Image: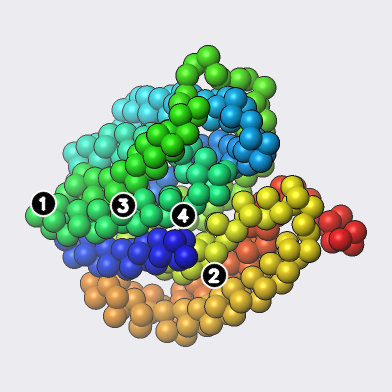
Amino acid sequence: MTSLAGKGVSIIVQLAALPLAIAALGPERFGVYATLAALLNWASIVSVTITPGLTVQLLKASAEKNHEAEGKIFASAFFFALGLATFLLLGTQILFHATGIQGVFGSGLLKFKDELEHGLLILSVFLAANIILSVAEAAQAGYQNQYLQNIFLSLGNVITIAAITLIVRARPTIGNMIVAVYAGPLAARAASMTQLLWCRRYLVPRPGKMSLPILRVIVGTGSAFILTNIAVFCYQSFSVFWVGRQIGAIAAAQMSVCSMILNVSGSVLIMFTQPLWPAIQDATARNDYAWVRRSYARMSKLLMIYVGLTALALAIAGNHAVHLWIKNGIELDTASQFLLGLYFLLVAWEHTNYSFLIGLVIIGSPPCRFWPAH
């Protein structure tokens, strides 16, 4: 229920924030912001090397009530995330200053050079902080306390919509847009970290608790997700960046709107699949495969009904929906809206099945060995 409420608030915020942001910045400046944010979204791949492994390991240690192991697992993940975030923050700044704005974004966005340089620094800091605090979100999932994370994220989304309404509309710059969009989720993760460490003092990270063998297991689990997340970055974020670099800011704004439609439509799936996979992992550890099988049959049927209806609506009336929503010069032609609906149908089917594979801790091979025996 908190996942439903949290994601519901998130959907409302995204639907309300995008037209507000485009109206405040204008389609071109918003396209520049979208190009910058899309390029740096590759940093989210880094978190994936840590968070799934941390969740799985904490699930096991918590089931055994082994607080010492839980402390070592969390400390290992936290300090690894801290090191990665620091390295990426410094490395990104050095790389971009060596390459220059034109070398990265092309000559078409040079008139926004100062705003891009300022925004690059602000966004890099926010993303580095999010990498560090992502361990709290993974730990909450490991303790099956996603309801707390959902509550915090709901509050963060309220902060986001208020910030866009007040800050960006008062002073419409790319830097202010970054602060408005990323400050809320960062505050939510910080609150989640504070609550986690306050209630579970044995998790407070100390260098002496860090364990390289545990870290290898965590990173080894996360590495199974890297290829998938690189693909997600390429088809979502990098495509927006490349369109902005090669065609222009307006085209990047149009591409960003398409990505937002996919994200909002997919958020309904995530309401159910995100809190479900740790429960599947728990059931697997208890050899309750009958429950997993029933859950798979029920969720696949219900979710794909929604997916089919949404895909059909996007294919037939996607451009009309964008006109009603944005009202600011963003167009989708007939071929684009058809492909958008088809793509959502395919990726939603993949996501539903992949969530069960994650819960069964089977990433590289099909789970056929489970079903006949149980």
**Secondary element at tag 1:** loop
Q: Pointers 2 and 4 in contact (CB under 8 A)? A: no
Q: Where 339 falls versus 40 (above or below)? A: below
Q: Which residue is mark 3?
A: 156
Task: Tell me which numbered mark, 2 or 1, is placed earlier along the sequence.
Answer: 1
Q: For residue 193, which quarter of the picture?
A: top left
Residue at horizontal 57%, vertical 43%?
142
Q: Earlier in the sequence, mark 4 or mark 3?
A: 4
Residue 344's tag is: 2
Q: Residues within 10 Å of mark 2 (few under 14, many from 20)?
A: many
The CA distance from mark 2 to mark 4 is: 27 Å
Which residue has dot 1 on it?
Answer: 171
Picture coordinates of residue 249, whole percent (x, y): 29, 56
Q: Is residue 328 above or below residue 355?
A: below
Q: Residue at x 47, y 79 (%)?
A: 314
The mark nearer the N terminus, 1 or 3, is 3
Q: Amino acid at mark 2?
A: Phe
Q: Residue at x 50, y 44 (%)?
A: 140
Q: Nearer the viewer, mark 4 or mark 1?
A: 4
Residue 213 horizontal/vertical position (percent) = 67, 22
Query: Mark 4 — residue?
Result: 147
* 120 shown above or below 357: above
| Quadrant location of the C terminus in the rendered image | bottom right
Q: Disc 2 or 4, which lies upstream in sequence?
A: 4
- Residue at mark 4 to residue at mark 3: CA–CA distance: 14 Å
> Is residue 283 left or right of 324 when viewed as pictured?
right
Secondary structure at badge 2 equals helix
Residue 66 in the figure: left or right of residue 236: right
188 or 365: which is nearer to us? 188
